[in-house]
Image (spheres, rainbow, N blue to C red):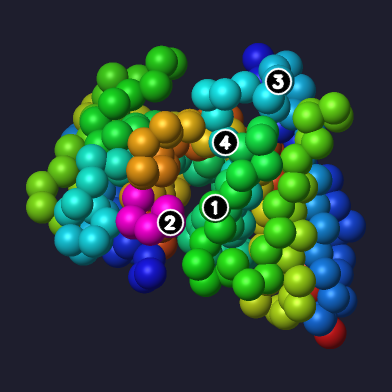
Amino acid sequence: QSALTQPASVSGSPGQSITLSCTGTSSDVGSYNLVSWYQQHPGKAPKLMIYEVSERPSGVSNRFSGSKSGNTASLTISGLQAEDEADYFCCSYAGNSNLVFGGGTKLTVL
Amino acid sequence: QLQLQESGPGLVKSSETLSLTCTVSGGSISSSSYYWAWIRQPPGKGLEWIGIIYYSGSTYYNPSLKSRVTMSVDTSTNQFSLRLSSVTAADTAVYYCARQAYSSSWYLRPHFDPWGQGTLLTVSS
């Protein structure tokens, strides 16, 4: 099972909206509404930001939202803030009792 | 508030077996609502799901690691463990334990929350 594909880096200015993509296949992202997103600051453990494509855990800012179209899931961050600068990873159910992560996207706030 | 803490040797020799333990505090590992997961991250790279264990002892492993992975759970001490055999330099990584949401259906839910702080395990030759 191959890792999901994420752009290596994305950048945006404060206040802007940006969208991070996570591309899989019809065997994982495309087949299940079971995609989650994690934020990871340097030297820290990942933090759950979105689960089941678009559900937001309590305590996560509503500036974070998720969606999916076909084999690609997306994480949108609106009103970009300096504290959003981090690595972001997606994860999907891949069938056959297996889970697969993306390679991660480094978000830079200019 | 549930907390997880990994513990392990920090350094393992190539071809040997890696052993890590995750201690759960602030909640019971015997909850029927959760699996307990191991995830790793090689330095500077992405995350890799290793597998999960339920309090009953049932397990699911990443097919790419299945032949080398064994997980166990001890409900009396609120701990679960990972053993990875025949390690190589490619197994050098930060190893995280995490709580994974349970599914009574045929699929697994990629819902990990919370996570431990992680422990770096280096494989030396």
Q: Is residue B60 left or right of residue A78?
A: right
- Amino acid type shown at disc 4: Tyr
Q: Earlier in the sequence, mark 4 or mark 3?
A: 3
Q: Position of residue A67 (x, y in %)?
A: 18, 38
Disc 3 with disc 2 on a shared chain: no
Q: Main secondary structure of the magenta part?
A: loop
Residue at screen point 42% across, 32% down: B104
Name the chain letter of the residue that bears numbered label 1.
B
Tag 2's secondary structure? Answer: loop
Numbered mark located on residue A98 in the image? 2
Query: Does residue A96 belong to the magenta stretch?
Result: yes
Q: Residue at x 70, y 20 (%)?
A: B28
Q: Which residue is mark 1?
A: B60
Task: Provide the secondary structure element on which disc 1 rests.
Answer: strand
Nearer to us in this view, B67 or A100: B67
Dot 1 and dot 3 residues touching (CB under 8 Å): no
Residue type at the position of mark 3: Ser
